[in-house]
Image (cartoon, rainbow, N blue to C red):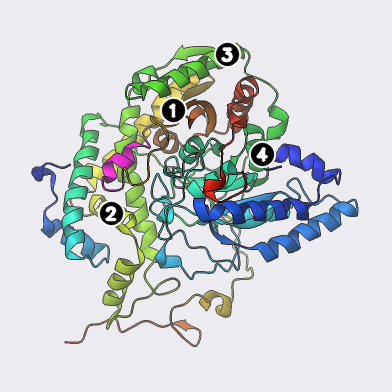
Amino acid sequence: MYRLPAHQLLPLLRARQLRARDLLEKALARIDGLDPTLHAFLALRADQARAQADQVDAELDAGRDPGPLAGLPVALKDNLCLKGTPTTCGSRMLETFVPPYDATVVRRLQDAGAIVVGKTNLDEFAMGSSTENSAFGPTRNPWDPQRVPGGSSGGSAVAVAAGMVPLALGSDTGGSIRQPAAFCGVSGLKPTYGRVSRHGLVAFASSLDQVGPLARDARDCALLLGVLAGHDPMDSTCRDLPVPDYQALMDRGIEGLRLGIPRAFLGGLDPEMATSFEEAGRALVGCGAELVDVELPHLEYALPAYYILAPAEASSNLARFDGVRYGLRVPGPDVATMMRRTRAAGFGPEVKRRIMLGTYTLSAGYHEAYYSRAQKVRSVVGEDFRKALARVDLLVLPTTPVPAFPLGEKTSNPLEMYLSDVYTVGVNLAGLPGLSVPMAPVRGLPAGLQIIGRAWDEGGVLACGEAFQSATGFHLAAAELGPSSGGPA
Amino acid sequence: MSEPETRLPLREVDHVARLARLDLEPEERECFALQLGSVLEYVGRLAEVPVEGVPSTLQAPANVLREDEPAAGLGPEVALANAPDRQGDYFRIPRILEED
């Protein structure tokens, strides 16, 4: 039961061989057993979830259809607003913040009959690559609790990887869905910028942020994306475009498709990760695809451009946390002192570092050299992707250069932590869809194959992931959670 | 980790902290001087990319307009529910001008 994907649970629920309430109780028991070790969750809402599950059961018993996700437990990254439940963003600043409205994606999940069980841990304000930057303590990787789960959507990736829930939502600004999916052995999709509403997602870098699914396989990502995607009048960057029936596209295969590999960019790859990637390439060829070398000559500049643009946008977005309307306030004799003290006490080191960096690169005298130049480099990187994707149908590369690293290894050197996003940030700069699915493990740890498509072609990206998973089965491997981790094995 | 010459001068650290409305502890000043210096050195690689005549990326579509129609808002009680301090239907803050 813990290992079944949502698309296999749904028929059982609809046939009444499985009750939503029983599925929820199993999820809650699993969380009880494992979360003291793994710390995937910041908050649970067991009572509301039980009431919702009972309602779904009553509707199914009465022969009604409560929606495409009816009865499936779902976890939310704690930067998505859930009305009436604290939304902390992993920050002391928002420890007591209770949103007065639901994020659009949360509303859509609930309208589809999903059962929201709780909020998952993250790097503070989604800034980080290891979930170690949470003010409420790190999340641990179920494959090896001494290692990080990746980040910033580490809690959501672990909740799925450890069999606590079949589905979770994350957000991806520079790799924050794909990298933890890769580190934890699950599937995670960053949709095209503008495919999914950001209304109710606490903003980090608004021109890069997208909400997306984490799940057991590509087919479940398609199921969840179908519910999340589509126009929202509350987000003017969310495009009014038709949403395909993603699940209907899943079996079309990749026979005859051309897949591009940016070989020149893969120099710094861990040798065993390179071996795993070569094996993945052979499996894709076995599915009928053709591998083609492509040039993305400016991709190496994506990471420095990202670490100018994302902190610049963050410094602006996080100006709203000023102790006036919500969140922490540390008293002061005048308003400026109150704000400086509040922000000093409320933000952790990485958030302060990015606010400082962004404020610096936007400040008088430096704006042209840093921010304006980075925006132009962003266009150059986007043009590289467009040219490559005019020659090939999809791009494939590893999601990360190395597998999950030990806790504490990179916390003292921010630049080294930033470098772990090297293969993911380009996709955010270009606004494209990117999927990570498990490929052959590296030294016993999960590794991710990243599949990148043209704008709005989530269907093609997901169908490639599905073909790869049908051929390889790497996504079926489960973390061994022995008695030492405190939970049921 | 960083060469001394990549440090950001403390004077600049203090200036940026003031712009960002952040009080820094003495050890944070030192730490940010080193860390920001090394990140700025790294992102300085962008100078290698020729960008003459290249347009900036604008992620949002031009203008997105809708009819301006009245709709229900949050209402004062809900909007003020998270306020650290309030007075009636207002957010309350300490005085804005420092006393001399």
Identified by mark 1, the residue type is Arg
Identified by mark 3, the residue type is Ala
Chain name for mark 3: A
- Callout 2 secondary element: helix
Counting from the top left corner in percent of width and height, residue A301 is at: 30, 32
Give the number of the mark in front: 4 or 3: 4
Q: Say whether mark 2 and mark 1 are on the same chain.
A: yes
Cα gap from disc 4 to disc 2, whole angstroms: 39 Å
The residue where tag 4 is placed is: A3
| First of labels 1, 2 by sequence position | 2
Identified by mark 4, the residue type is Arg
Cα gap from disc 1 to disc 4, whole angstroms: 23 Å
The residue where tag 3 is placed is: A289
In magenta stretch: residue B54 = no
Chain name for mark 2: A
- Callout 1 secondary element: loop
Q: Say whether mark 1 and mark 3 are on the same chain.
A: yes
- Callout 4 secondary element: loop
The residue where tag 2 is placed is: A353
Q: Are marks 1 and 2 in contact (CB under 8 Å)?
A: no
The residue where tag 1 is placed is: A443
Which span is picked out in magenta? A410-421
Can residue A239 be seen at all in this image of the molecule? no
